[in-house]
Structures are given as structure tokens and as C-alpha cells.
Amino acid sequence: MSLLSPVEGWYSKKVSKDEKMWIAISFALCVILFVWMVLWHVFGNQNPSNTTYRTSPAEYIKLYEAYVKKNSRGNDNGIPVVMPEPNSDVIMLAQMWRWSPVLILKKDEWYNIHLSSADLLHGFSLQPVNMNFMVFPGYDYVLRFRPNAVGEYKVLCNEFCGIGHHTMIGKIVVIENEADLEKYGYTKDKLSAPNTATAVTDTTTAATTGEMAEAEMVKAGEQLYALKGCNACHKLDGTNQLAPSFKGLWNTTAKVKENGQEKEMLIDEAYVQSSILTPQKHITVGFEQTIMPTMPVTEDEIKQLTAFIKSQKN
Ligand code: CUA
């Protein structure tokens, strides 16, 4: 309610000249700003817009796993390393709590980088160049991307995504030629030759035929541990920051919460299987804040992962 009520008939009164002028000026300003919304996109040095496809986490994880199995050249701190061909499609996955794979790209070459999330909203923030994208699960974002400066770049997550958010740091290395690789710690013995790293595929095939020795099972399990991202939380050195370390875990008793009730459970085959397939069913006491995602896994993969956990002695 205003203090003074307007005089009768104010609405039908003629608008004065300067008032008309101001209406014209503000209208022109609106139109200019509106046009600049579009122009700024072209001239304003904005983050590029991207093509987006509908997908599902399960579908995208499958795509990512096949891509990494085929193109992995080794590991960098447990994260698969891929050196994609220029102009190829690169499949990158955001998950709680890591970016995978590590990319080695060539300067001045184009790449189609696909981004999606396996679980919840993450933020792709390329530093120090400060390119930012939101990465929702269920969408496949394609960035046409041409690095124009060599160096090591970090991919930070800039959307708060839970207790391990601060550990979610990925890596993109841009090189001029292969000789630069050593500068970034990728020595010859650390990176395998392209298309020879088919060990995961090979062992998986062997597993399905039931011809796998224990040592091979452990090896396959170790590769799955890196591929599926278990290593983002479950460490092998006994540190229990985000989730129980696998070191010396086998055959011990875990204090867990099931339906709000605390109980003790032996860590054996059945326990591991249930933890992978229904991670929320029983949660180790002390790690209630860590939400373990449900990963698509086959029975053989569970067996291999179990063998790997078993092999992590004290
Ligand atoms: Cu992912 Cu924060």
C-alpha cells in the first residue's frame, strides 16, 4: 500500500515527452543486451558450448570400460593412462571420487572429449586455464577440444559431491611430441606401447572359460580395481580415509551397521560379493558418510576382485 493514492484517472493521462524518451532508451537497452547475449557467446571468449547426448550411467560406464581396456597405456597413481589419437572420441568418466582416465594429448590437435558421471553431479574444472563444465549423470557431453599450450593440467571437481570431493583431482598432460613424455614422469617402462595393453580383456576371456590360475585372477582383479575406480576410496597402504583399506582386510571381522543395528561380519567371499552388489546393505562403522556406488560387475569380475582383496596381506 502506498502512502499517497494516485489521482483519479492517472492511467488515461497523456505520457509526457521525457517519459516517452526514457521508455524508448530503456527499451533500446533491453534490445541491445538481448542481442549481446548471443554475440557475447561468439566474441566474448566464453567456454565452448557442447553437444550433449542422452545416456545412462550404466551405458556410459560400459562405454568407458571398453574404451579404457582398449586404449590403456598404463597407470598413473592407479588411474589408467590413455594417449588418444588426434580427432578421436575420448571417453572420460567422473565418479565418486576421481576422474578417469589420465589423458595425454598432443598440442594443436583436435579431440572429442566425452564427459559423463557414473553417480551424481560433478564439475569439470580444467586448471589453470579455468574451463568449467557441469557433469550430470545421464548425459554425454562432447567437448571439441584443441589444447594450445603444453603442460600438465589438473581437472578439479568444482561441485560439492560428498566426503571425497576434495580428493577428486584428474590430470591432462599436453605434449608437443613423444619425447616430452619423460618430462612428466611417463618413462618407457611406465607406458606400454599402444594396443598391446589388452591384458584385462585377455584375462577376462580366460576367466569365462574357467582356466584362470589364482595369480592371474589377482592380476585381473588388480586391473579391475583401477579400472572401476575402487582405488578412489579403498587404498592399499592401510590408510582408511574414505573407506576401509584393502591391506590385511581379508578374513578379519568388520563391525558393520545393517538396518541401523551394529553387528560383526567376517570378511569373506560372501561379504565382498554383497558389498559390491548391495553396498548400502551393511556399512562399516565409521564410514557411514562414504556412499559406495553400485557398479555394474559380472560374476567373474567379482571373483577377480575378491582374489585381489584376498592377496592384499598385511
Ligand atoms: Cu566430484 Cu566434487
Image (tube, rainbow, N blue to C red):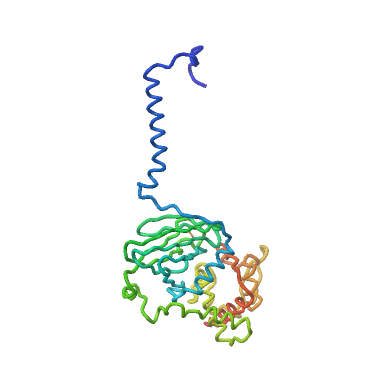
**Residue 164: x %, y % from top left:** 49, 63
Residue 19 located left or right of residue 264:
left
**Residue 207: x %, y % from top left:** 60, 82
* Most distant residue in the front direction: 87
**Residue 159: x %, y % from top left:** 47, 55
- Please name the residue shown 46% across and 69% down the image: 101
Number of marks drawn: 0
Q: Quadrant of residue 217?
A: bottom right
Q: Quadrant of residue 272?
A: bottom right
- Please name the residue shown 48% across and 65% down the image: 92
In this view, the residue in front, 146 or 132, is 146
- Please name the residue shown 51% across and 74% down the image: 69
Residue 246 located left or right of residue 156:
right
Residue 293 located left or right of residue 179:
right
**Residue 221: x %, y % from top left:** 55, 79
